[in-house]
Structure formats: structure tokens, C-alpha cells
Image: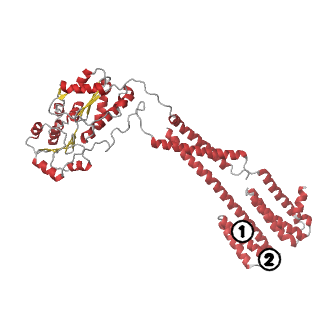
Amino acid sequence: MTDGPARVWFEWLRWGALGVAVVVLTIFLVVQGRATIDVSYGQSPSSADPVPEGEAGELSDATVPSVEEMTRMVADNQIVRLPGSIAHIDEDRVRAEIGGTDARILIAPPGLDEDERERVREVENATVRVLGTEVSGGLYQAVPDDFDGWRKRFATGDVTGSVTLLLRELRGERTEDDEDGEDDTIAWREPTAEEFGPVAADLRETGLHTAEGSTMDALPEAAATAFPDGDALYAVFPQQEADQPVPDYTTALAAEFPDRPIVVMYGSWVEYRGPYEEDFASVVTASIYGQLNDRLSKYDYPQSNVLHAYLNRVTDVRYAGLFDRPLPYQPFDPLRVTMPALPWIFAACVLVFLALSVRAVLRPVTRPRQFQQGHTAARLAGLTALAIEVSALTGRDGDTPLTRGLAALEGARKALNDKLPDQHVHTLLNQAEAELDDTARAVGRTDYRPNVYLQGRLA
Amino acid sequence: MHWLIWIAGTVVLVAAGVGATLLPQRRARALRRRTAWSTARAEIARATVSRDAAPVRVEEAERLLTRAELIAADRGGPDAAATTAEYARRADRLWREASGD
């Protein structure tokens, strides 16, 4: 087999196409594995996981007694408050709701770990369990479904409404308008001058006020992207007393600092007042508390982490385009531009490989067919002619080798017709030639020896 | 739509690769088989001529040729053809020796 330069070139192209196809396919698969659903309008820089599990300080030091002890406590008292609990219930209202039934309530602290929560759940004589501010009982869990309910739960820890609602549900006496009847709104009062003075002073000075008892030392990083102008004011207060009116710092600060973003935190509740308030405040609050309600009520997150999550969400909304600002420049991403072309590159490589493979299969061997076949056929013809000529001369002596030679020639002719390899045909012709040589010697005619005869013919 | 290209393309690639490997292989095997049988038939023909020319019967050579013809009648792969050719060649040599060549 001789390889022409074209053939070599085609082979290179064929395997090159295969290689490119495989590389492209690999890129495609790798990109698939990494693909993430990104719905941000302008590549929002908020961190992807605002509240990482277990590492956000959501577990408190509080613990609970053993199951037996808690069971005994619940058996002794209708309403049991374990040390460290933050949930508040209006006992008069709850006792009135319990009435003559044997319903019992167990209030446990927030931030328990899995084992401790399991222990609280195993107290079987407790009708309603309050874990942090999560209210559950039987198969139910009572969750506030509006801003007033969330505000009351996270700002003051008041779960009276949820507890009474759940008690009624468990008795099977809840009606549709029960929920509407609940008074979830917080009683506000104006802060006194002594209360407001230090807050305003702090804000004027540093932009951040952390009240006594709050769990925040410094602003979370997300503040920089949430309010990039840097004029936002943050006032952080601990969870408020549920049975007393709450000082309304938000309104007071808005009056003191008009047209500046004001973020006020009571416990786990974040209020916003300021520019674009109606554009995004309710969106952010609904999405944050709708998503994290479960975790915020069960765990004991530091306020800085809750604020971080809130500000991250503000950033997301900002990058969603609601603020009507120009987006930052996005660098050119070659992968994003190349990706749509990949399938077509792949398809082209496949077609090239397919075409060249078909071509290679259809033309398996390139040999100088005409020359070689012509040569073989000429030799067959020459030997056949010699055999016929010599057959007239043979007697008994040369008969057998001649017959054998004719048989070999017949085999060679068939092999040539069958397009068997030339080498094979030549082997058969060699045999025939040897037999004819024997024949010539047997009849004593050296001029009929094949090499002599054929040379004479060719000459 | 685009994911179809990936699946169809991969299938075609694998098919073309397998085809391009198997077809020439099978073709080469068939050629080897036909060549071997061609050799075997030539040997049998030669042995037959030598038998007809031999002055005496040679039992063993006849047995060998019969066996070779039996194997040839069954057809088979290149190995069977090689065996056939070998038997025929030995039979041919025995008859030639008997003829005094």
C-alpha cells in the first residue's frame, strides 16, 4: 500500500475532526455541570449564600432539660417557660382560650441544636410547643402571613395570636374570620427625648447606632452594595417588650433625617424608611421573611447576620433594575459568546469525520492497480500460451507436470478473477512456472523453459 | 433543539468510528479466507493430478486426500483451509515419491 500525500492529509483531517469534536463535547459537558440558574439582571455582587447553615451563629448557648423533666414540668403547669425563651404570650388571653380544656403549652428557647429540638418535640403532653418563636402543635404550625404578623413576631417575640389560633384549630373550632379578628399590630409610641437623643447623635456621627442588648457590633459588608452612596443610617435595637408600646424610632428618624435611607432593626425585624421606599421595601421584606421565616423563628441569629441577609436582598433588588440606575460595566466573556457556536462546531466536526470515514472505508487500499494487475495478467497469459505450445510436444514423461501446471494456472486465473491479492496469484503462478519448467526439461526443450520463453515473448 | 445536535452527533461519531474499524477488518478477514481456500483448492487439484499419474495406489496419500476433500466440503475459516492445503500437499508428495519424481 502506498500512501499518497493527499491520503495522509485526509487522515490527519479525519482524526483532527474527531479530536476537535471530542474536545468540544467535553467543554459542553463540563459547562453543563457548572451551569447555574442566574436570574440576576446585572450580575448582582451579593453573596450567594447569605445565611450559611450552622456557621451563622444561629445556635444559642441555651439548652433544655431532659424529656422526662420537661414532661413533668408540663404536667405541673399549664404554661411552661424554659429559661432562655424569647417568645412572649399574653397569659390571660391564652388561659381564656384554653378554658376548661386540658391544653398545655411549652415555651423553649431559640437556637437549639437538632438533639435538643428533638427532645422538645418528644414532650408528648404539651399541646402547643413554642421553639424560639416557632409555634407548632399536633400536625400544625402557625405562621404569620402578613407584615403585621411578622413584625409582631420578630420585633417583640409575641406569639399570642399564633398560639390561640393553633389552640382553636386543634379543638377544631377555627372559623374563617378568626385570623382577621386577630390584632397583630404593634402599639407604637413616640420615643422620649432621652431615648432619641443618643440615637440621633450616634447616627449623625457614625451612621450606626447599636442599642444596649443588640447583637451587632459592626455593619455587615453587604451595606456597601445595598446603599452604595454611603448615606444610609442604621439603628439596631434588641427585641422589644411585647406588652408595652414600642418606641417608633423609624418615624422619628425619618423626621430628623429627611431623604436619607434609614434602616431600623428591632430584634430580627428590619424596617426601612427613605428614598425608593415604596419601590422596594415591601418587596425585600416579603421575600426575606417569606423565605427565612422558618429559620429566623426557630434559631437565634445574631442581628448582624439578619441585617446582612436583608441588605443582600436589597442589593439583589437594586441589581434587578428597580432603582433605575445604570449598571456597572460588564467585562466581555468569551465563553458566553462561544457557547452558542459550540453545537455547530461539533456538528461540522462530526460531518467531516463521517465523510472521511466513509471515504476511507469505500477506498480501503490504493495501489497502482493497473500496473500490477496488468503485470500479473500478462504473466498468466504468457504461461498459459507456453503450456499450450508445450502440450503438443509432451509424451508420457512431460504429461504429469504439464497437467499439474495447467491446474495451477487454472487456480491462478480464478484467483485473479476473484480479485485476490497479487502476491497470492503470483505464488500460484510460481508453482505453475516450476511445473512448466519440469515439463520443458522432461521434453528436452530448453527454449520452452518459462524464463527463457517469457523473456523471448516480452522482448 | 441544540441538545439534539449533541446526542445525534455523538451517536454518529461512535457509529462512524465503529463502522470505519469493523468494515475493513471484516473485509480483510474475508479476503484472507478466500485466499486460503484458493491455495487449498490449488493444492487439491495438484494432488489429484499426481494421484492419477501415480503407477501404484498409495493408501496413506489417498486417506490424506480424502480427509482434505472432506474438510473442503464443509467449508470453514482460514485455519480449515490451511489444514486442507497441508493434507493435500503431503498426499501430493507421497504420490510423487511413488512415481519416482
Q: Is residue B80 visible?
A: yes
Q: Residue A222: image x %, image y %?
A: 35, 33
- Near-viewer residue (A208 or A390): A208
Earlier-in-chain disc, 1 versus 2: 1
Task: Report helix, strand or loop for mark 1.
Answer: helix
**Above or below, comparing residue B84 to residue A64 in the picture:** below
What residue is shown with label 1? B85
- Near-viewer residue (B9 or A335): A335
Q: Residue A82: image x %, image y %?
A: 16, 45
Crowdedness near tag 1: few (<14), some (14–19) or many (≥20) residues, C-alpha within 10 Å = many
Same-chain status of marks 1 and 2? yes
**Residue A173 occupies which quadrant of the picture?**
top left
Q: Which chain letter goes with mark 1?
A: B
Quadrant into which the C terminus of chain B falls = bottom right
Q: State the count of labels.
A: 2
- Near-viewer residue (A348 or A229): A229
Circles 1, 2 touching at the beta carbon (< 8 Å): no
Q: In the image, A225: left or right of A92?
A: right
User: Residue reaching furthest left?
Assistant: A100
Q: Residue A202: image x %, image y %?
A: 27, 27
Give the colour scheme shown.
Answer: secondary structure
* Distance (Cα) linking label 1 and label 2: 18 Å
Q: Is residue A191 visible?
A: no
User: Which labelled disc corresponds to residue B97?
Assistant: 2
**Residue A186 occupies which quadrant of the picture?**
top left
Q: In the image, A201: left or right of B51?
A: left
Q: Which amino acid, mark 1?
A: Ala
Q: Which amino acid, mark 2?
A: Glu
Q: Residue A94: image x %, image y %?
A: 12, 38
Crowdedness near tag 2: few (<14), some (14–19) or many (≥20) residues, C-alpha within 10 Å = few
